[in-house]
Image (cartoon, rainbow, N blue to C red):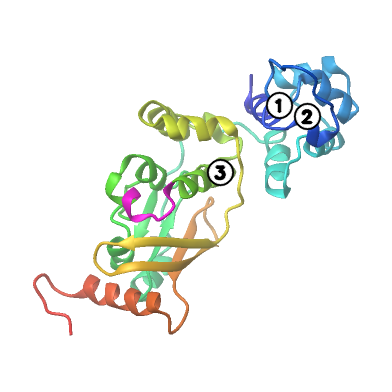
Amino acid sequence: MNALGEFLRARRGLVDPADVGIPVRGVRRTPGLRREEVATLAGISADYYLRLEQGRDRNPSRQVLESLARVLRLDPAATAHLLSLATAAPAPRRPRREVVPVGIRQLLDALELPAFVENRVFDVLAANPVATALWPSLRVGQNRLRAVFLDDVERAMVLDPERSAAGMVASFRASVGAGTDDPRVAALVGELSVASPEFARLWARHDVRELAGGTARLQHPAVGPLELRREKLPVGGTDGQLLVIYHAERGSESARSLALLGSLAVSPPGGAVD
């Protein structure tokens, strides 16, 4: 089974038959929809749909894919992911070395807000001191997904860790797309699947969430509760790098706490803060 087939199988298992007009009588052994039900609702043959799930037909038309997206009740982000799975080229076996543009590095140094750069697999490529003061895992060479599931200190800071973890996995799906055969992705997914049953469960759902900003609510050990906005901005001229910036509403308690965190980040060891 290829990435397209895995996605179709996982998503049909999450659809309630009643939501697509199929009456349920008695006990169903198959969670969600059966293959033949998906095929009928999408207007294709059961044999053709079986070939899609088994990876024996990897070039379905856009019309077929959009019909399947409708049956599987996919939102726009998940539909775009489905379309990309059918057209993506194989990932390179030796990824190129990633370099953060000089201008972006200078911007990180100039910003007084927590900011960092991540790549498609959520490795931290660069970070300013305020970002590291906010999240200990925001250091060059660390991986954001690994921290979410394996770092107890960081997880304890998040006020809703289960929701945050689910969103991170869904965003990771969107980021890597069909590149799950990339050695970096395969190694990370394998490691986390063994070490974290929660990750394994979430990964198996094939949820997809677009790479966009959001809200982070956390209890920081140094400055207390924070409610921050998170913006994700594409870095031009790179292969999917994102500049991530945290900020708070002007005049809010979170803004004052974030300013204090910034002063702590730039103070010399043992230095006093007024």
Can see residue 92? no
Find residue 90 and report its image quarter.
top right
- The residue under label 1 is 32
Number of other residues with Cα within 10 Å of mark 3, as a class: few under 14, some 14 to 19, many 20 or more: many
Q: Which residues are magenta?
A: 155-161
Amino acid type shown at disc 1: Gly
Q: Which mark is residue 214?
A: none
| Callout 2–callout 1 Cβ contact below 8 Å | yes
Front label number (3 vs 1): 1
Task: Kindly report the distance in space between the C-alpha atoms of the residues bearing marks 2 and 1.
Answer: 6 Å
Find residue 18 and report its image quarter.
top right
Task: Kindly report the distance in space between the C-alpha atoms of the residues bearing marks 2 and 3.
Answer: 23 Å
Amino acid type shown at disc 3: Ala
- The residue under label 2 is 17
In this view, the residue in front, 236 or 248, is: 248
Q: Quadrant of the C terminus?
A: bottom left
Q: Quadrant of the N terminus?
A: top right
- Image: 154 above or below 71: below
Q: Position of residue 77 (x, y in %)?
A: 68, 48
Q: Which secondary structure, mark 1?
A: loop
Q: Residue at x 71, y 45 (%)?
A: 80
Left or right side of 126 for 229: right
Q: Earlier in the sequence, mark 2 or mark 1?
A: 2
Left or right side of 248 for 23: right
- The residue under label 3 is 170
- Image: 103 above or below 98: below
Amino acid type shown at disc 2: Pro
Can see residue 259? yes
Q: Residue at x 75, y 25 (%)?
A: 33
